[in-house]
Amino acid sequence: MDRRRRTLLILAVLLLLVAAACGCHFWRAMHTREQEQQVFETLEEDFALPEPTIPPADENNEAAQQEVTQHDNAALASNNNDYIGWLTIPGTVINYPVMYSPSQPERYLHLDFYGRYSYSGTPFLDARCDPHDGNLIIFGHNMINGSMFGSLKSYRNESYLKSHKTVYLELSDGIHVFEIFSAVTLEKDDPWYSFLHASDTEEEASWIADLESKHGVHTSAVPSGAERLLTLSTCTGNRKSERMIVVAKEI
């Protein structure tokens, strides 16, 4: 075998080894994400209330008619006092506890509900927010397997938004229902992230008008008054500074 063919053979073997190593790494990562997702599924099973289930918010919305489980919030909070509620969007994988740790704003970026390391993390409320008022900004990872807030990218499609527009947020004071009206792409330092509370309807209308001017999908179901808002935020995976938000109003 001449030197050129031997060199090509060595290169081919090296490429195969690199490909195999990458494949193993990818498989391990996906397997780990599946295990992390299983923790949440088990958590829901352990703390689900048998009755009642949350009633459909929109009888004309097929996704919203799917059975939504109510959770034992008191028991969840007794297991972790950073727990403040449960977030569910029927017809999607978003069905997770929400954490709130004002003294450690990003504590759950890579921790699961029980405080163990988890690359997927757990959705958490912005530390500056009041859990019972204003614009509730909840962060979650955009996971490659579609878990956590990975499905938010589907809201770039208007028909998907309209068929998955209902959001349930269980808090200590009861079940709150929200309707999604906008899905936009913006920068991580966008002023929207500083909008935590509107002093009156005029101020909220100004913020909403600015939101509607951004690139994305918008419906006609914009807030008409000083409704409480819910903002779900995740990275897009395109640029480090780019984020996607899905915004809903309480109904």
Image (cartoon, rainbow, N blue to C red):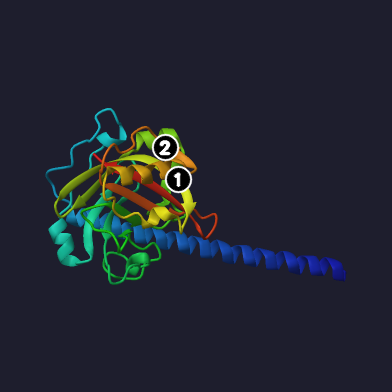
**Residue placed under numbered mark 1 in the picture:** 184
Identify residue type, mark 1. Val
The C terminus: image quadrant: top left
SS type, badge 2:
strand
Residue 217: % across, % down: 45, 38
Position above or below: 186 against 11: above
Q: Could you tell whether 69 is left or right of 249 in the image?
A: left
Q: Is residue 62 left or right of residue 77?
A: right
Q: Could you tell me residue 12's position as x and y percent?
A: 73, 64
Looking at the rendered structure, which numbered label has been put on residue 214? none
Looking at the image, tell me whether mark 2 or mark 1 is earlier in sequence order.
1
Calculate the distance from the C-alpha at mark 2 to the C-alpha at mark 1: 8 Å
**Quadrant of res 184:** top left
Task: Quarter of the image for the N terminus: give it.
Answer: bottom right
Residue at the outermost right position: 2
Residue 91 appears at what percent x and percent y?
A: 33, 40
In the foreground, 40 or 201: 201
Q: What residue type is labelled 2?
A: His
Report whether residue 69 is seen: no
- Looking at the image, residue 104 sits to the left or right of residue 141; the answer is left
Give whichever of 10, 114 is nearer the camera: 114
**Mark 2–mark 1 contact, CB under 8 Å?**
yes
- Secondary structure, mark 1, is strand
Residue shown at 36%/63% (left/top)?
121
Question: How many residues crowd around disc 1 within 10 Å: few (fewer than 14), some, or many (20 or more)?
Answer: many
What count of labels does the image hold? 2
Instruction: Relative to 206, say whether 101 is above or below.
Output: below
Q: Residue at x 88, y 69 (%)?
A: 2
Question: Label 2: few (<14), some or many (≥20) within 10 Å?
Answer: many
Observer-nearest of 113 and 174: 174
Residue at label 2? Answer: 218
